[in-house]
Image (cartoon, rainbow, N blue to C red):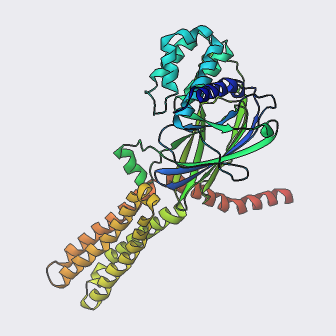
Amino acid sequence: MEGHEKKGELRSDGRLAVDLVKPRARWVHRRVQKLTKTAPEYEKSQVTVDFTVPPDFAGSKVPISFLPKWPPLTEFDFKDEAGRPIPLLTGRQNQVVDRALLRELVGSVDPGLLDCAAVKDAIKGVTSRGPGDDGVALEILADHLTPFMPNDAAAELTLEMAAVMDGSSLLWVPIGDEQRGHRTVCSFNYTTKSDEALGWGRRALRSLGWYQAPEYVPLLHMGKAANFHLTVHAPSTMKVAELDPQYYEVTASPEDKPNAPLGFTSFTPPINDGSRDSIGQLYVSGTRPLVADVGVRLMISRGRVIGPAIAATTLIACLTTACAMAHKTLVEPDAVEATVTVLTVIPALISILLASQLRDAFVRRNALGIQLISMASGLVPLVMALTLIRCAFGEDDPVALGTAWNVSAGISWLLVLLLLVGQHREIKRCAQAALGAIRTPFRLFSSGRRKTD
């Protein structure tokens, strides 16, 4: 348990750090975050922060970032630029210094607010170490700060910081005299679990490749004007389809500030739907809101997962159609054995190849429906082989065999259609590219004739 002197030092650090969180405090230069999906429900963040502590700063700790309170962090690693471990505050110590900073911000709006019992309880609730109280404390604090807005910049900053601290804790770095006024780099890594909020219906659509919901990752940056660079690495069986940054003005609605300049820029390099690139990047510069997140939408790789599944299902559909068209010839005694072998061995080999992809956890989570449909198409030739054997032994007549095989071929193409529905955008893109390639020679020929004339 911390003594009074230790708590006093922590409170002092929190009060002194108020100037460091203001929009014009440009002491944080750059923040780089690398996000890697290590498992379907887990992601690893590797963060590097480049900053310079002001020479006249009197505190012994500075806040360089936020850390989410929930879900819990695992494998946390905090190091300086030389790779040496940096001591981390305990949960109780972090709560004390965070609360001191927020109290100082509230007092800068109106010292009388700190005499209100509801405001005191709200500050405690916002800076609590658990997942919070469903935003109740933040709402109470917002009710007391709203009358000072939108003309009071201190009130806006206080509410913005409270909104972030309601779900996050500040990460504090101890500093010495030799670090003041000099460029410093710190890095930290952690793994967190992402929440699955999809219902069974959307999960089924996702497994068929018809729908892919984004996962929202908080952009927990410190320094409202620091350059921010986010890199997202997808696993080998997936690709980054979209990065959509979202910034939230918690202090005022757009109607309150109709002529306010944007003040910052976000740039995401274009992601080609046809590429197999598993890396997505986001760049942010300029002063922006602290409350922000990015929607990361990952998709199963078409070239490695969806493409082979569609190719295998289409091959099986062609096989069943050819057999259905030639059923009068294949029912002859000399052709029965070879036909049964083809209808059983080839689909079985294809199904085994597709089933091996299910060993990948990301494929099981995001493309289970695609794999099941592909393997179901492999059962159709087996049913056709069974009906052929029954016909060879006189249990079914050739007319019934032809009807059964025509139905089986129709089912095979229906399964192909189910897989193609989810890829309509890719099919449209390929069709447009092929049409453009066909039109190019004619355009060159026409332009050449015009020049000749």
- Closest to the observer, 226 or 431: 226
> Where residue 58 sits: x, y (%)?
75, 28
**How many numbered discs sit on the rendered protein?**
0
Above or below, comparing residue 153 to residue 267 in the picture: above
Residue located 76% across and 26% down the image: 24
Task: Report the residue that reaches farthest toward the right.
Answer: 452
349 relative to 28 in the view: left or right: left
286 relative to 272 in the view: left or right: right
Report if residue 138 is visible in the image. Answer: no
Quadrant location of residue 226?
Answer: top right
- Closest to the observer, 241 or 421: 241
Which quarter of the rendered picture does the C terminus lie within? bottom right
Above or below, comparing residue 21 to residue 312 in the picture: above
> Where residue 67 sits: x, y (%)?
57, 38
Above or below, comparing residue 277 to residue 285 in the picture: below
> Where residue 146 sits: x, y (%)?
57, 13
Residue located 39% across and 77% down the image: 349
16 relative to 382 in the view: left or right: right
- Closest to the observer, 18 or 445: 18
> Where residue 6 sits: x, y (%)?
60, 30
Residue located 71% across and 35% down the image: 265
Task: Report the residue that reaches farthest toward the bottom.
Answer: 334
Residue located 70% across and 45% down the image: 186
Above or below, comparing residue 186 to residue 235 in the picture: above
Report if residue 111 is visible in the image. Answer: yes
